[in-house]
Amino acid sequence: MLMKFGLPSAEAWSKVPALEAPIAPSPFTNPYLTKLYEVTMRGSTPLTIAIIYFTSVHLMNKVVRNRQIRKQQQLEKSSDGKQQPGSKKRLPAAPYSISKTSTFKLFVILHNIFLCVYSVWTFIRMITTIASTMDIFKLELIPSFYESLKVENYTLQKLDVFFQSVCDSKSGIFSRVITSTQGLHNLEILGFWFYISKFYEVIDTVVILLKGRPSSLLQSYHHAGAMMCMWAGVRFQSPPIWIFVVFNSFIHSLMYFYFTLSCLHIRVPQVFKKSLTSMQITQFVVGGSIAVLHSFVWIIDTSKIVGAEHMELVNCISTPEKALPLLINVAYLTPLTALFAAFYIESYFKTKNA
């Protein structure tokens, strides 16, 4: 048996994380990418950008709503003098002139296509990396490990190999064994670029504002929180961050595909939009639960072979630094799930009843 379930490591959850802990060496050889890696791994970078983004959006929301109110007043005056007060939710869009240009419309289409393709690429590469890591453990590392311990009869379960591959800091999906032996990107690189993509995704909000609609709290909270979650997971190389990358890239593949179709004025069935929102809520609940499960997983510490009779186990969340991203993600996902649930009810149940 490679792994077992047990209580979380007391050491990981009883100590304060060392936020000043050294950053892992850059996985890039290019000096510009290395500099980008070093700058974006500083905690001040995502925190500053997230605060500026969140504050700016809600300041702009006031400007956009004032434009909507003025447009509503103009429409009321032009409708035979009939004054019909409208709620903020039903205020008409007040687009800026740039949003009506063909260049802007083309940019939005290309933006959605790019994020759709990138999300598909990330999902496939991440799944491939996990599968390849499991193969390496099953066919090479685990047999050699047991051979060194002089253990002849052993059985491998897929769940054992899976958790060993995602939790093992020495040879797992965060290590560079995958890159060197299989020519694949490991989670260190895939996670970094996925983290960077969270900054680029704020363009979604810019597009909404330019189209004359305010950005919802759901969207601004979603984008700002994702920056911090991905930073923490990549910065401290916490094993459960693979869940964020896999689940989120899969959902984004479908979401940006839907946005692309909408930009091309291709009608999408309501059931698809409803299913997409349901999957988003499901990824938060299921993904968060699996992430927490990692803290109860104990794997064989392949860096400490002490003898056939004394195989040493180590917790998947073995340090306070690896536990911190898990706490941040759970704290982020709890209100996000509630916001998405409220959006689901507002969009599909109240609309249907009306």
Image (cartoon, grey):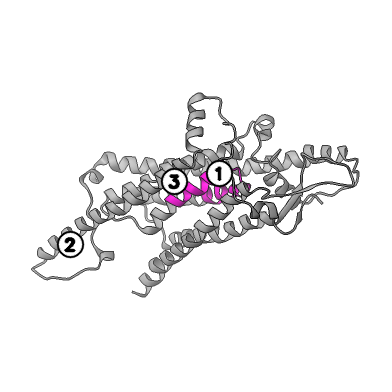
Seen at 49% across and 29% down, the residue is 35
Three-letter code, disc 2: Gln
The span from disc 3 to disc 2 (Cα, nearest Å) is 37 Å
Disc 1 crowd rating (10 Å Cα; few below 14, some 14-19, many 20+) is: some
Of residue 204 and residue 271, the one placed in the foreground of this image is 204
Residue position marked by numbered label 3 in the rendering: 47
Regarding mark 3 in the picture, which secondary structure is present there?
Answer: helix
Residue position marked by numbered label 2 in the rendering: 72
The span from disc 1 to disc 2 (Cα, nearest Å) is 50 Å
Disc 2 crowd rating (10 Å Cα; few below 14, some 14-19, many 20+) is: many
Q: Decide: marks 1, 2 in contact (CB < 8 A)?
A: no
Three-letter code, disc 1: Leu
Of residue 89 and residue 324, the one placed in the foreground of this image is 324
Q: In the displayed structure, would residue 72 be above or below residue 130?
A: below
Point out the stretch of residues depicted in magenta. Answer: 224-250
Residue position marked by numbered label 1 in the rendering: 19
- Quarter of the image with the C terminus is bottom left
Q: In the displayed structure, would residue 342 be above or below residue 162?
A: below
Q: Of label 3 and label 2, which has the lower sequence position?
A: 3
The span from disc 1 to disc 3 (Cα, nearest Å) is 14 Å
What percent of the width, then of the height, locates residue 210? 27, 48
Q: Is residue 72 found inside the magenta-colored segment of the image?
A: no
Regarding mark 2 in the picture, which secondary structure is present there?
Answer: helix
Regarding mark 1 in the picture, which secondary structure is present there?
Answer: loop
Of residue 269 and residue 172, the one placed in the foreground of this image is 172
Magenta stretch, overall SS: helix
Three-letter code, disc 3: Leu
What percent of the width, then of the height, locates residue 225? 46, 52
Q: Of label 1 and label 2, which has the lower sequence position?
A: 1
| Residue 171 position by quadrant | top right
What percent of the width, then of the height, locates residue 53? 36, 47
Q: Is residue 228 found inside the magenta-colored segment of the image?
A: yes
